[in-house]
Amino acid sequence: MNEIEHQLSVISRNTVEIIETGELRKKIEQSLATNRPLRIKYGIDPTAPEIHLGHTVPIKKLRDFQSLGHSILFLIGDFTARIGDPTGRKETRPNLTVDEINANLSRYRDQAGKILDLDKTEFVYNSHWLATMNLDEILKVASIFTIAQILEREDFTLRYKAQKPISFHEFLYPLLQGYDSFVLKADVEIGATEQKFNLLAGRTIQEALGQEKQVVITMPILVGTDGKMKMSKSYGNHIPVETTPKEMFGKLMSIPDSLMADYATFLTDIRADAFKTMIENHPRAAKSYLAAEVVNQYFGKPASDKELQEFDNVYRDGKDPENIPDFTVPAELREDDGSVSLLKLLTAAQAVPSNAEGRRMVTQKAVDVDGACITDPFARLTLKDGQVVRVGKRRFFRIKLPT
């Protein structure tokens, strides 16, 4: 396999679509002939402070390009975040303030550095050019598109037909994202499949303004821990990169079995055929192996080994986990006879968010005290110092009685 074919093979792995493969081949050929790295663009709006595992799918593709010697342009959309990407939205996003945006992006570099070589990554901010555009420049870009083209977007079409408002500034979003590609002279832009319209806008603007069109590469969207919606902090189904090994391991163990193969493919280098066999024969072991592999990437092998061992202790051998947090029972929870309402105990210890959730966990036989299952949600307990309470598979606390 020659170098061009090798690069195409690495780049195309796990992608959904490349527009156009022939153009990418020519760009790689020119890059090798002139010893000029390709300029690879990926943009993210700092609408939240966390990068989650869903974001890492396209970022890992950046790492592939980086391993092939190409230049990475990690674009922080600190200006476009003021508009808010309308992609997939049923209503207008609330506008963010500059202070909110700055607070969100403050940690992006460190989080991206868990995947990319930061010494070979250029971070760029689109406020540097978008904030200084004059009206003449804006009109020039806006004239490239028709309203009919913009309304071809499914999200805009659905909102228009449902007579839901579409603010004019939302029409500008794909134009500004496309203009970023022109300013950066991007050879390739990477994004999720839902970003296809915005990514293609970059090609349109580059061509209209006399620049060679970028190649567009779309990546799959990672479904969140609920097994239904795309991973997003807004949906509460995300796994942040900047968390603890225990939390990441636990959330990965909570995903539906149906997601294991996709998570292994898009988040790790686990061999698909071998992992499929493991899922079929030992699904729980497969999930813990997957969780350990992901934790290893972000926290190292000692941390992943520790979480895997603790999982085996708790779920295979029935032992209590290490470092169980203490919960000191407040005096006001205890009746005159010293007993405590089970539901009040669980909510006070923040093991459940509400009495209703506590009742649900008890009726599902998911609550025990020192290994004894509690089946009555209205039970009153006479507690002893040091007792361990388990709620569900992952929540534990140790009773501490005030002296």
Image: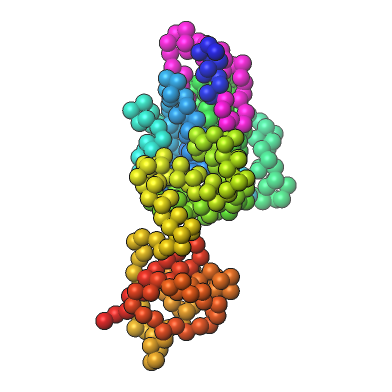
Q: From the viewer's perspective, is residue 1 above or below residue 278?
A: above
Query: Looking at the image, which is closer to me, 2 or 387?
Result: 387
Return the residue found at the far bottom.
336
Please tell me which residue is depicted at 26% across the width and 81% down the height of the picture: 403
Please tell me which residue is depicted at 57% across the width and 39% down the height of the picture: 275
Q: x, y percentage for residue 387?
A: 38, 74
Q: x, y percentage for residue 97?
A: 42, 48
How many numbered discs, if any? 0
Return the residue found at the far right.
161
- Look at the image and tell me whether residue 394 can be seen: no
Which colour style is shown?
A: rainbow
Q: From the viewer's perspective, is residue 371 above or below residue 171?
A: below
Query: Looking at the image, which is closer to me, 136 or 19?
Result: 19
Name the quadrant of the N terminus: top right
Please tell me which residue is depicted at 57% across the width and 31% down the height of the picture: 14
Q: From the viewer's perspective, is residue 5 above or below residue 245?
A: above
Q: From the viewer's perspective, is residue 174 above or below residue 23?
A: below
Q: Which residues are magenta?
A: 12-40
Q: x, y percentage for residue 202?
A: 56, 27
Q: x, y percentage for residue 233?
A: 50, 51
Return the residue found at the far top.
33
Query: Looking at the image, which is closer to me, 115 or 316?
Result: 316
Find out whether residue 13 is within the magenta segment. yes
- Look at the image and tell me whether residue 19 can be seen: yes
Please tell me which residue is depicted at 50% across the width and 71% down the height of the picture: 367
Return the residue found at the far left.
403
